[in-house]
Image: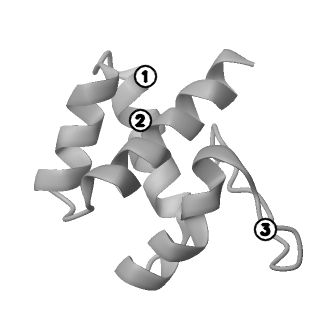
Amino acid sequence: MSAPRVPAPDIDPANKPKGPASYFPSIEKTYGLPMQHWLDIAADQLAAGSTHMQVVESLKTVHGLGHGHANAVVAYVKAKLAA
């Protein structure tokens, strides 16, 4: 198995992350899957040519994420891929 394109960050509960990653603990708790799952989906769709909003819409309609959570996942992946 290859390494994920955008690895999930290690989040220290004592130091609340800023930006899109601040949603990650809530996303894991709400949907019961690790962040790597969502990051991989977003990275794959972006690599396939989908736009930011197309990936957000897919995460919402196909996977059941709320808009804010979906947007945070895509924004995080895009920022990491651009770095």
What label sits on residue 36 in the rendered view?
none
> Does dot 3 land on a helix, a strand or a loop?
loop
Q: In this view, does 9 lie above or below 51?
A: below
**Mark 1, residue position:** 47
Q: Alpha-carbon neighbours of circle 3 within 10 Å: few (<14), some, or many (≥20)?
A: few
Depth order, front residue of 81/70? 70
Depth order, front residue of 70/6? 70
Q: Position of residue 31 (x, y in %)?
A: 36, 78
Label total for image? 3
User: At x 46% / y 70%, what residue is drawn?
Assistant: 27
User: At x 78% / y 68%, what residue is drawn?
Assistant: 11
Q: In this view, does 80 lie above or below 33?
A: above
Q: Which of marks 1 and 3 is nearer the N terminus?
A: 3
What label sits on residue 11 in the rendered view?
3
> Does dot 1 land on a helix, a strand or a loop?
helix
Q: Position of residue 6 (x, y in %)?
A: 65, 41
CB atoms at circles 1 and 2 under 8 Å apart?
yes
What's the amino acid at mark 2? Asp
**Any part of residue 32 in sight:** no
**Any part of residue 44 in sight:** yes
Locate the C terminus by quadrant.
Answer: top right
Locate the N terminus by quadrant.
Answer: bottom right
> Does dot 2 land on a helix, a strand or a loop?
helix
What's the amino acid at mark 1? Ala
In screen coordinates, is 73 left or right of 68?
right
For the residues marked 1 and 2, what is the alpha-carbon distance in whole angstroms?
5 Å
Q: Alpha-carbon neighbours of circle 1 within 10 Å: few (<14), some, or many (≥20)?
A: few
Q: In this view, does 52 lie above or below 32?
A: above
Q: In which quarter of the image is residue 57?
A: top left
**Mark 2, residue position:** 44
Chosen colour scheme: one colour
Q: Alpha-carbon neighbours of circle 2 within 10 Å: few (<14), some, or many (≥20)?
A: some
